[in-house]
Image (spheres, coloured by chain):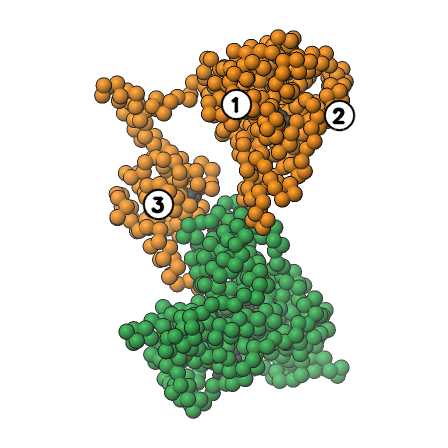
Chain colours: A orange, B green
């Protein structure tokens, strides 16, 4: 049985598993957090505590993709709207019942030394296992000089982190904003300020969309909207990129709690492979409830079992050194696309993608006989379509006609004429066709060049100079 | 002329609820999003009118419903009735790649209906080239789908087209023949009205049956399009066929669709096993007949009806009697019909009665549905247009007959297929006519 426990994260924090609820609506109250622990979450970051605010309504809106809801979620919610006293009292109570589940308190107060000292003292007294400094909320609070207004300036980040560290007895994490030009600069500043760990990323600045009837962007708060924070599956690639940047620079790397778009164990594994110790989830739990953690934990364990990993440390960071600069890539490596005739359903999507979006080397010429070579030799999409649309088709009304129509025209499930063919002499191996093909593993890229030495841009430069 | 609709009959509507009900807006978008948007899509290729299926479905998914409907109408002016009447299982949906993708095909027919219904609800009219902007005059004889499509296409290109129809109402079998749970008579008439507003002139209640009538048309018009369909139902040629209670299938269907026959009871025997027989049998059930038999002289595997039509009829409660042939109709003292039938076996290519297998079916109606007879004799006699087995011989690419001023399409030229084939024929003929006309003009 693989062990998915977390040991001594940021120096001190143990947890039953790496799945934590991120600071947000799912960690708003003690009652919620106890249910979350019962559901299987390994830790929580409490909804950011500070001087209570008043929220706008409505405050969420989302991007749906082809009928799938909440591919991306935008919010204009501020920090906790409940008093510091209520939050801390409940935190202490939960801690009594769940001594082995870490509770990290997310904090945001005025950029004053005394204010930070006071909140740190009170929070730790209440029983928090760690502190997460919210220098990254991109809306509202930043207009009041807090949140990302701090996290976008290395000097502020370093200074406030240092103030907190003067007081704190528990590990201090700094939560980073993606809305910066170079996240490593901010991470390094937090590190210089003495942070024990980092959390990344908070939400991405966004306007989610505009209502075409009212012409007001969403969410529409009485006729106006405002910049929001983007979260959910849509932001995962951005988060992975920033996590990789932080962890591969020795000046910024620290124990990291990764987040941004995690909605399955697969996403979580990716963050850990880039060096994260724990992962946090917000949108997925808002969408489907706390139960999403069940499959996350089981899936992670099962994956570790098949891969032979005993602990999280066994695979943490394994993909980090697989990211190189572009100039470090081997330009002698060449692949070409290959279509599995047995799997192809004949949708033609690879063909049109290759003609319009790539290198004009997928053709429907299996029946007419293959011709390899440049674009001029082949019928382009307009000709292909014209031929079908001027063809003669009738309803098969007799039994014989229907039987004739039903018989397959060739050795594969799809009629041969409808299975496109890749001209390997022209294929650049760009991979677009494999991406658009709706059938899993139908188009694969095969390595064609095995030419002795890898060659990359860096080497070319050194040869030239 | 008149394309006025007959009033919507609520009872009829209730009895003949749609077998493919309309999609709700959300269901339509979800279904539209399932479409893979194939390039050179097989559904489009399979459609006789080559509607750009992925194109109109994409427009539904983005909420561009007007664009979607116009895309459909562009290829098929009867897109609305085709959405409901087409045997999509053997056409677009039958060709959908989803069959090979471990999934149900996209519900193309229902999506098409969704787009067309939304368009009709806006009441928008279709734009055509200014009437008479091309100096071509065409008379379309017959007012069914073939002629409607031909005339509309001609109008779109600026020609002047008229439709001459023997019946009071235009639409051909769309109005008088197609099962009400697929296509309502009122829907067919609404479509004809749309075509009238495009500029097509209708002369209904006028049959062309004499040499003089043809001559008159020839002097008035440059081209003639024959869209006369097939003729009346064939007779069974057995004694007793002309008594009360024996109704041929087409008349039966036309009477219930136009509200002349509202109710049935007792036992009905339909003779034949094509799609018309199936429609008649299902309709008899829905009109209230307790027991409906479908009698066929061959076996289940030989029946010509589409598989889904057969399934549907079984679902409606129609009972099938295979390898049985009627040989006489009598009446008993209570006035009920007695249908004398006998079991038949196939010996070589002929059917031999099985001795001792005679059986009398006591019933209230007998509905022969054993095929329509060809109907185009007139033009052969008068204009020496070649017929083969009663079907007008045309060049399939253009619909042109041996007489270069005469074109033909639809059932009378293809031997009897479906509405969409008639539309495709009409459209092709119109384009061929325009081409000849443009060449002559230039
Ligand atoms: C019972 C039944 C059910 C069907 N169900 C379906 C279905 O569900 N789906 C589907 O796609 N297809 C169905 N079909 C087939 C479809 O109705 C036909 O293929 C289609 O209507 C053919 O169109 P058309 O224009 O060629 O002929 P028709 O629709 O037959 O129209 C021909 C018109 O010409 C008129 N006419 C004939 N001679 C003259 C003359 N001398 N002068 C003036 N007018 C004349 C007739 O009165 C008629 O209105 C069905 C057919 C039947 C019989
Ligand atoms: C509605 C909402 C409220 C949030 N409130 C806070 C907060 O008070 N403090 C904080 O540090 N982060 C807050 N966040 C940011 C989340 O903790 C997290 O960094 C971000 O949502 C990315 O993770 P996700 O993609 O799993 O949601 C909030 C996010 C959301 C969606
Ligand atoms: S995208 Fe895939 S399934 Fe579609 S035609 Fe190309 S290879 Fe076949
Ligand atoms: S074949 Fe099916 S999935 Fe492909 S475009 Fe047509 S309807 Fe859509």
- Element type at marker 3? helix
Chain identifier of the residue bearing label 2 in the image: A
Seen from this angle, which residue lies furthest bottom?
A: B212
How far apart in space, not on screen, are marks 3 and 2 (Cα)? Answer: 57 Å
Name the residue beneath numbered marker 2: A31
Asked if marks 3 and 1 fall on the same chain, the answer is yes
Tell whether label 1 touches label 3 (CB within 8 Å). Answer: no
- Name the mark nearer the viewer: 3 or 1: 1
Q: Position of residue A404 (x, y in %)?
A: 43, 58
Q: Name the residue under label 1.
A: A152
Residue pictured at 71% horizontal, 14% vertical: A122
Residue that label 3 marks: A355
Q: Distance between the residues labelled 3 and 1?
A: 44 Å
How would you rate the neighbour count of disc 1 (Cα within 10 Å): few for under 14, some for 14-19, many for 20 or more?
many
Whole-percent x and y of residue B198? 49, 72
Q: How crowded is mark 3: few (under 14 residues within 10 Å), some or many (20 or more)?
A: some
Chain label for disc 1: A
Residue A282 versus residue B267 in the image, above or below: above
Tell me: is circle 2 under 8 Å from ligand 2: no
Identify the mark at residue A117; answer none if there is no mark: none
Q: Work out whether residue A211 or residue B150 is closer to the camera in this orientation and state it.
A: A211
Foreground mark, 1 or 2, reads: 1
Find out whether the residues at labels 3 and 2 contact each other: C-beta distance under 8 Å. Answer: no
Residue A137 shows up from this direction = no
| Mark 2 secondary-structure assignment | helix
In the rendered image, which quarter is residue A134 located in?
top right
Residue B340 spot, x, y in % from top left: 64, 77
């Amino acid at each position: 049985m693989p062990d998915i426990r977390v040991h001594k994260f940021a120096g001190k924090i143990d947890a039953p598993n790496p799945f934590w609820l991120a600071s947000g609506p799912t960690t708003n109250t003690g009652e919620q957090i106890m249910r979350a622990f019962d559901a299987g979450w390994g830790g929580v970051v409490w909804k950011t505590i500070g001087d209570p605010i008043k929220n706008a309504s409505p405050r969420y809106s989302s991007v749906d993709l082809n009928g799938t809801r909440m591919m991306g979620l935008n919010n204009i919610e501020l920090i906790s709207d409940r008093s510091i006293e209520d939050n801390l009292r409940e935190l202490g109570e939960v801690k009594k019942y769940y001594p082995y589940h870490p509770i990290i308190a997310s904090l945001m107060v005025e950029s004053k030394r005394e204010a930070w000292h006071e909140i740190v003292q009170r929070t730790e007294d209440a029983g928090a296992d760690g502190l997460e400094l919210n220098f990254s909320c991109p809306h509202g609070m930043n207009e009041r000089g807090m949140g990302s207004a701090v996290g976008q300036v290395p000097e502020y980040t370093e200074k406030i982190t240092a103030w907190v560290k003067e007081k704190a007895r528990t590990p201090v994490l700094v939560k980073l904003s993606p809305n910066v030009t170079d996240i490593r600069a901010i991470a390094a500043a937090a590190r210089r300020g003495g942070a024990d760990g980092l959390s990344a990323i908070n939400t991405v600045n966004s306007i989610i969309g505009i209502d075409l009837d009212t012409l007001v962007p969403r969410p529409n708060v009485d006729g106006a909207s405002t910049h929001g924070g983007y979260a959910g599956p849509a932001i995962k690639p951005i988060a992975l990129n920033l996590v990789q940047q932080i962890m591969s620079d020795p000046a910024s790397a620290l124990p990291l709690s990764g987040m941004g778009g995690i909605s399955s164990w697969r996403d979580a594994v990716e963050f850990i492979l880039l060096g994260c110790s724990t992962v946090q989830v917000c949108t997925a739990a808002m969408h489907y409830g706390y139960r999403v953690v069940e499959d996350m934990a089981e899936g992670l364990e099962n994956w570790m079992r098949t891969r032979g990993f005993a602990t999280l440390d066994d695979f943490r960071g394994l993909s980090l050194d697989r990211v190189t600069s572009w100039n470090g890539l081997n330009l002698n490596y060449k692949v070409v696309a290959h279509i599995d005739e047995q799997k192809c359903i004949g949708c033609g999507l690879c063909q049109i993608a290759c003609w319009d979006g790539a290198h004009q080397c997928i053709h429907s010429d299996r029946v007419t006989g293959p011709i390899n070579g440049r674009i001029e030799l082949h019928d382009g999409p307009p000709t292909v379509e014209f031929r079908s649309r001027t063809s003669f088709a009738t309803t098969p009304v007799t039994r014989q006609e229907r039987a004739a129509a039903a018989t397959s025209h060739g050795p594969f499930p799809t009629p041969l004429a409808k299975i496109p063919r890749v001209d390997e002499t022209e294929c650049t191996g760009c991979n677009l066709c494999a991406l658009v093909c709706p059938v899993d593993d139908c188009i694969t890229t095969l390595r064609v060049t095995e030419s002795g030495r890898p060659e990359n841009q860096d080497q070319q430069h050194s040869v030239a100079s | 002329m008149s394309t006025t609709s007959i009033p919507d009959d609520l009872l009829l509507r209730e009895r003949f609820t749609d077998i493919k009900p309309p999609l709700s807006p959300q269901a339509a978008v979800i279904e539209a999003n399932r479409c893979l948007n194939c390039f050179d899509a097989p559904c489009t290729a399979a459609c006789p009118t080559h509607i750009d299926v992925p194109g109109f479905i994409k427009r539904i998914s983005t909420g561009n419903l007007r664009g979607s409907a116009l895309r459909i109408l562009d290829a098929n002016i009867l897109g609305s009735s085709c959405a409901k009447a087409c045997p999509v299982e053997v056409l677009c949906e039958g060709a959908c790649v989803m069959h090979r993708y471990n999934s149900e095909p996209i519900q193309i027919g229902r999506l098409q209906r969704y787009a067309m219904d939304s368009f009709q609800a806006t009441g928008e009219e279709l734009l055509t080239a200014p009437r008479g902007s091309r100096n071509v005059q065409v008379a379309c004889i017959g007012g069914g789908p073939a002629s409607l499509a031909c005339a509309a296409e001609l109008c779109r290109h600026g020609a002047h087209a008229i439709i001459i129809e023997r019946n009071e109402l235009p639409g051909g079998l769309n109005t008088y023949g197609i099962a009400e749970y697929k296509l309502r008579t009122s829907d067919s008439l609404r479509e004809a009205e749309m075509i009238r507003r495009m500029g097509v002139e209708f002369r209904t209640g006028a049959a062309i049956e004499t040499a003089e009538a043809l001559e008159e048309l020839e002097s008035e018009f440059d081209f003639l399009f024959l869209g006369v369909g097939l003729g009346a139902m064939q007779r069974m040629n057995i004694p007793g066929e002309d008594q009360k209670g024996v109704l041929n299938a087409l008349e039966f269907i036309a009477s219930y669709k136009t509200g002349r026959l509202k109710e049935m009871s007792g036992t009905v025997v339909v003779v034949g096993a094509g799609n018309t027989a199936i429609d008649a049998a299902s309709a008899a059930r829905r009109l209230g007949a307790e027991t409906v038999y479908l009698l066929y002289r061959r076996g289940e595997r030989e029946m010509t009806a589409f598989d889904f039509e057969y399934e549907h009829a079984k679902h409606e409660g129609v009972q099938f009697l295979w390898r049985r042939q009627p040989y006489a109709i009598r009446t008993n003292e209570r006035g009920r019909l007695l249908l004398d039938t006998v079991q038949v076996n196939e010996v070589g290519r002929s059917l031999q009665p099985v001795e001792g297998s005679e059986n009398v079916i006591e019933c209230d109606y007998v509905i022969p549905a054993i095929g329509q007879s060809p109907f185009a004799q007139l033009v052969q006699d008068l204009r020496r247009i070649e017929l083969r087995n009663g079907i007008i011989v045309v060049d399939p690419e253009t619909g042109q007959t041996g007489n270069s001023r005469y074109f033909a399409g639809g059932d009378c030229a293809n031997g009897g297929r479906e509405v969409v084939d008639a539309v495709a024929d009409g459209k092709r003929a119109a384009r061929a006519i325009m081409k000849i006309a443009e060449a002559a003009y230039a």
